[in-house]
Amino acid sequence: MTEVALNELQKQIEAIRREAFAEGYAAAMAAVRELTSRSASRSNGGVAAPSGNGSSEGGAEHPEPRETAVPLRTNNAVRRGSAERRRTAAGRRTAAAGNRRSREGRAQRGTNARMIEQILKSAAPRTVRQADIRKALHEKGISLAFTSIRHALGQLQARKLARHGKSGTWRYSAAA
């Protein structure tokens, strides 16, 4: 007798759980449709896209804008998405360098090598260490990692514009 009542209670709980899940899912999908129709109406110049439920949102009635979700505050980069990691890393890099890049995006290809070539030319007969190159770049307001400097020096060496000296020094050599 108690097993029958227990089984009946479990069936009722499962039915209520399924119903609540279905209602929550329907509400979430309605919110998704609403948000997509808003973004579609903005991108179409004010013309509302069909929302799938037969009503259009382009009329006089505009629902209250919902608050956007606030992400969890965490210093752990593993918990963040890859786009957010890139965004925060790029923000720190430009803020630390003190120079803001334009809205067009990244610098042109080969810019690092050209800057380093100018530094080597200015120190022409002498040899220059990577740390001195980095220091000269910092004085110009440019922050560049040692690996990027080494890569640019390798490019210049391949073009025969720079020669590797003793003890990790570099010297400008005019292309022959």
Image (cartoon, grey):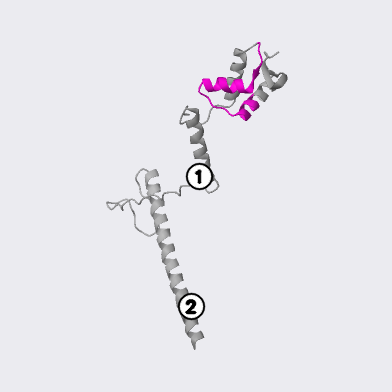
Residue sitting at the far right: 166
Image quarter hosting the C terminus: top right
Q: Residue 27: in sight, yes or no?
A: yes
**Residue toward you, 159 or 46:** 159
Relative horizontal placement of residue 171, taking residue 136 as reference (left or right):
right
Q: Residue at x 66, y 21 (%)?
A: 156
Q: Is residue 165 left or right of residue 27?
A: right
Residue 89 sits above or below residue 26 on the image: above
Real-space Cα separation, disc 1 to disc 2, in angstroms: 43 Å
Q: Secondary structure at mark 2?
A: helix
Indicate the position of residue 6 as horizontal and vertical percent values: 49, 82
Q: Nearer the viewer, residue 142 or 38?
A: 142
Q: Residue at x 59, y 13 (%)?
A: 122
Range drawn in magenta:
125-152
Left or right: residue 56 versus residue 83 is left
Circle 1 residue? 75
Estimate how packed mark 2 is, as few (under 14), some (14 to 19) or many (20 or more) residues with alpha carbons within 10 Å. few
Residue 6 versus residue 50 in the image, above or below? below
The residue wearing badge 2 is: 10
Type of amino acid under label 1:
Asn
Residue at screen point 63% across, 30% down: 147
Looking at the rendered image, the disc whose residue lies closer to the viewer, 1 or 2, is 1
**Element marked by disc 1:** loop
* Residue most extreme to the left: 60
Query: Residue 165: x and y, percent?
Result: 71, 18
Q: Is residue 50 visible?
A: no
Looking at marks 1 and 2 on the same chain, the residue that comes earlier in the sequence is marked by 2
Crowding near the residue tagged with mark 1, few <14, some 14–19, many ≥20 C-alpha atoms within 10 Å: few
Kind of residue indicated by mark 2: Gln
Q: Nearer the viewer, residue 158 or 53?
A: 158
Say which mark, if any, is on residue 87.
none
